[in-house]
Structures are given as structure tokens and as C-alpha cells.
Amino acid sequence: MIDAETGGRALDVLDETIPDVVLLDVELPDINGIDILRRIRARDLPCAVIVVTAHGSVKTAVEAMREGAYDFIIKPFPPDRLIVTVRNALERRQLQTLAAANEVAKEGKFCGLIGASLPMRAVYNVIESAASSRATVFITGESGTGKELCAQAVHELSPRRHGPFVAVNCGAIPRELMESEMFGHVKGAFTGAAGNRDGAITRAKGGTLFLDEICDMDLTLQVKLLRVIQSGEFQKVGGNETERADVRYVCATNRDPWSEVQAGRFREDLYYRLHVVPCAMPPLRERDDDVLLLARHFLALYSTEEGKQFTDFDEGAVRALRRYPWPGNIRELQNVLRNTVLFNQGPVVTEAMLNRLDPTATARPAAIATLAPAPRAGIPAAGTIKPLWLIEKEAIEEAIALCGGNVPRAAALLEINPSTIYRRKAEWEKERLLSTG
């Protein structure tokens, strides 16, 4: 529980976190409680507000309820009355959260992210839990899994969502320019600095700074970033004026950050400063039928953009989408479907449209990457090659055995989510029971 004795302090608290329930006195020493209630509703903060006052009147009660208060209590009141009111408000918030979760399960959409699988719902839970604080979220995952969309979701659900969201790709900016990109520079700071320029920290003031591919940041700049995070202050390149860093940090990488620390490429002290709330984005191959939700979303989007009439996939195309491992994840799926829409006519996408065309053909370009490789000379008979599912099963069972039955540890070594192992084990057990009749 957080206490705020003044309206100003209450607004500062609401800038830092989003409580489930707010007990709001009308007569505060500096700001009228109804004005704070209006600010809470103007910012669309998802918290239940219970207005408390010793100056009870029908007019005040009506005004508070009209401005979005959950309930109204007049002082003095018995403790049981307050306890019941707060409990009811919390239950209402829980029902709202459950309804939102059910909607995600039904529609498969959450703050710009698409997916209803268990691994993605775990991601949604992390986002919802972390968004209301200023704790740094550290997103990991393969390229193309949607790490920036995850960062944007954290921003959109946070108290800073009305501030800017500024993204910096630490791996795409040359080392000699990265410091200026982060902190800005003053005129004459270096050759080519013709004027003052604000850096990403300044541009993200009051909002969120997303540091993508953070493990690619130069070690020298890591030291400077650590100093900014610890002190909350920085200076522009070539400048003497100290500025305040009013940002919430969200980071991402497609590498294992702890392995980067052990290899000496990422500072351990910076790791502990940034790796506060870990969030692992699952690869598309571990997201069950999310591939179909995403495929239908992109099919509709690109069909509209290209003026095509595609409406769905036939059964063969659905099987092809499901069995392909998608090493490039969602980004590869987008590429596949854009090309499919561009070079074919609807209304239904067939499996043939998803296969690579004959490379010797010149009538039209290849539609997409191969989803079902064509047979070639010299490939052994099917019976001499282990099925992929069996190789996966043996690898998982061996990892669990080597880790003494510790599934989370085995999952970490296999670089997959623990939920994937539990799901696979349940599937194997189900198949075993069916086979034994």
C-alpha cells in the first residue's frame, strides 16, 4: 500500500505505478480530490477509485460517480464498511482482468500482439504485471518474434503511455555515432555537428526508451548508460549542462544476455540494472495454432493493400503453415504471405501457392520460401531417417535427465520455454495411453 498525504504526491505516485484501488479523499491540502479523479479517468488508468469524504452530500456523491468513481464513502465510517468496499472493488478489477483474458483467448489479440497460445498468454501476463511500474523489462527472443511490439505493449499499458515511445537499434547505428544518438550533442562537439541535437533520452522524456539489440552496444557506451541509469542524469556530447533522464527503459536482444556477460561482451553490473523483469518471446514454431491467427491477419491486410480477393486458406495450405518450422518467425511469415498475395489470385490460398516455384521457370517470380521441400536425387529413404518429433523427444528427455529432472533448467539449456516441454510431455503421454488402449 502506498500513502500520499497531498494531491501532488498522489499524482507523482500515479506516474510511477497503477494501483488496483485508489482511496481518494475529496478535501486534500493542495488539490481537490475530484480533480485528481478527473485526471485518473482522463489518463484512462485501469484502477477503481473509492472517494472518501467527511463532507458528504448528494451533490458530491453524484459528481464523484459521474466522474467515474467506483463507490463513495462518508466519514466517519466503520472499518468493516471500508473493508467490504475495497474487497468489492478488487473483485471487480479481477473480473475485468478475467474478462480481458477471455477476450484474448477468444480473439487472440492483445495490445497489437496476435496469439492465443499458452506461451503468448504467459507473455501477456508479464506485460500486464510489469507495465504499471517503472521496472526495466528485458525482452529476449529470436529475430522476428515481435520484441518491439512487446515493448510497445508495455508502454501502452503503463502510466507513461501518453508520453513518447522512442526506439533505438543499438546494432544498426555505427559505434562512433551511438553516443550522440543516445545523449544528443551540442554544436561543434565533433566534425559535422553543425547544431545542437537532442538524443533519444531527451526525445523519450516522460515516456519509454526502447533499446533494441542492447547486447550489441559498445562496452564504453555501456559504462555511460549505467551511469545515467544510476544517477538519472546525463550530459550531451560536448556539453556541460546536466539534464535529467525521465524515461522508462525497455530492452531487447536476440542473444542470451547472461552468455554475453560471461563472454565479457556485456557488463555484469549493467545486466543486473536492466534484467529486472525478463520476458521471453516464444518462437513461432512453439506457438501452436497462432501461426493460423497470424496468417489470416496478414492475408486480410495484404489482400486489402494489393486489391486482391483472398479470404482464407484451403486445408492443404493450413497443413503447410502448421508443419513448417518458420526459422524466420513472424517476419518470415509476413514475407511469405505478402509474396503469395502479390503473385497469385484468390479467393483461397492453396498449398501450391505456398510452395517455391520451379527455379528454372521465368514466367513469374517465385512466390515464397519453400514450405515443403521437393524430393531430390540422393536423399535416403524415409525409413533411414528419424522423424523430427522423435529427435525432439529424445533431445528433451536427455536434457531433463542431465538436469536431474529440473524442467526449467533443461528448457534454458535447450533455449525453449518450460511450457513447451510440459506441453510436449502431455502430448506424448496422451499418445502412449491411446496406443495402449
Image (tube, rainbow, N blue to C red):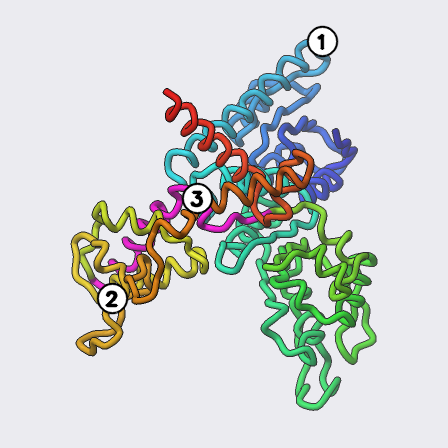
Q: CA distance from mark 3 to mark 1?
A: 63 Å
The answer to whether 280 appears left or right of 323 in the picture is right
Task: Answer with mark 1 or mark 2, whichever residue precedes in sequence.
Answer: 1
Q: Is residue 131 visible?
A: no
Give the quarter of the figure containing the C terminus: top left
Q: Is residue 81 above or below residue 294?
A: above
**Mark 3 or mark 2: which is in front?**
3
Q: Give the x, y percent position of residue 75.
A: 71, 16
Number of numbered tags placed on the structure image: 3
Kindly check if marks 3 and 1 are in contact, taking CB atoms under 8 A apart as contact: no
Mark closer to the chain start, 3 or 2: 2
Q: For the magenta stretch, what is the residue range?
A: 280-307
Q: Secondary structure at mark 2?
A: helix
Name the residue that disc number 3 marks.
Answer: 389
Q: Is residue 48 visible?
A: yes
Give the mark nearest the N terminus, 3 or 1: 1
Say whether residue 160 is left or right of residue 77: left
Q: Secondary structure at mark 1?
A: loop
Q: Residue at x 68, y 39 (%)?
A: 403
* Residue drawn 63% across the image and 28% down it: 21
In the picture, residue 30 is in which quadrant? top right
Residue annotated with mark 1: 78
Q: Main secondary structure of the magenta part?
A: helix
Looking at the image, which residue is at 61% across and 46% down?
279
Closest to the observer: 387 or 33? 387
Residue at horizontal 40 percent and vertical 44 percent from the top:
290
Determine the image quadrant of residue 165. Answer: bottom right
**Where does residue 210 sit, x and y in percent of width and height?**
61, 59
Name the residue type under label 1.
Pro
Where residue 342 is drawn, which disc sits there? 2
